[in-house]
Amino acid sequence: MMFKLLIYDFKMSHDTEQQISALNDLIRINNDRITGYKKRMDIRIDDELEFMFLQFIFQSKQNIEELIKYVWSLGGKPADGKSLSGKFYHAWIDFKFNLTKQPRHIMLDYCENSEDVAKSAYSKALEDKGLSWGKKIANTLKSQLEELKMSHKTIMALRDKTAMLA
């Protein structure tokens, strides 16, 4: 009986560690998203894009706040940095953008791809059979994913509209 309890305790601890790791990955994705939009704002952009990028930055900051609360509640330490892949990706995009001074629709294409990465990370976290999310956390992740999907649609529509005008 004691052996069964130890295995159960280990499983619970391992599950919790996996959940914390997944939530921290989502925190990093949101941090990458903030960095990407701030970098796009450093480039001369119009008021429409600036307003939209500020909304997305605010959205990611809210997401991070919620995710941090769940990490703490699970007994973990929230991630504070950007993902390594995100750092390399943003560095490459910045280098590429500065060399070619791409038009607006290309910048929006970059943003659309970044939104795809964020949506994918959330979908994977929700679909992972090894993660047994509680109802409250699962609902929060689903809600954040729906907001990301709406942001993605907004960017795609603006990109397509801009491409047609170019």
Image (cartoon, grey):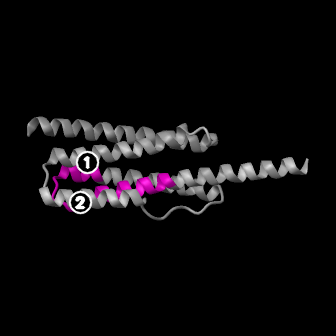
Percent position of residue 142, x then y:
50, 39
**For the magenta stretch, what is the residue range?**
25-53
Left or right of 119? Residue 2 is right
Q: Residue at x 21, y 50 (%)?
A: 49
Q: Residue at x 54, y 37 (%)?
A: 127
Q: Is residue 153 magenta?
A: no
Left or right of 156? Residue 6 is right
Q: Return the residue at label 2.
A: 94
Amino acid identity at mark 2? Asp
Sequence order check: which comes first, mark 1 or mark 2?
A: 2
| Secondary element type, mark 2 | helix
Q: Residue at x 29, y 43 (%)?
A: 112
Percent position of residue 76, x then y:
62, 60
Q: Residue at x 79, y 48 (%)?
A: 8
Left or right of 72? Residue 122 is left
Report crowding for label 2: few under 14, some 14 to 19, many 20 or more residues within 10 A (C-alpha): some
**Front one among 14 and 52:** 14
**Front one among 40 and 5:** 5
Q: Is residue 40 magenta?
A: yes
Amino acid identity at mark 1? Tyr
| Secondary element type, mark 1 | helix
Q: What is the magenta segment's predominant secondary structure?
A: helix
Q: Quadrant where the C terminus lies?
A: top left
Extreme left residue here? 166
User: Which picture quadrant has residue 71?
Assistant: bottom right
Q: Return the residue at label 1.
A: 110
Report crowding for label 1: few under 14, some 14 to 19, many 20 or more residues within 10 A (C-alpha): some
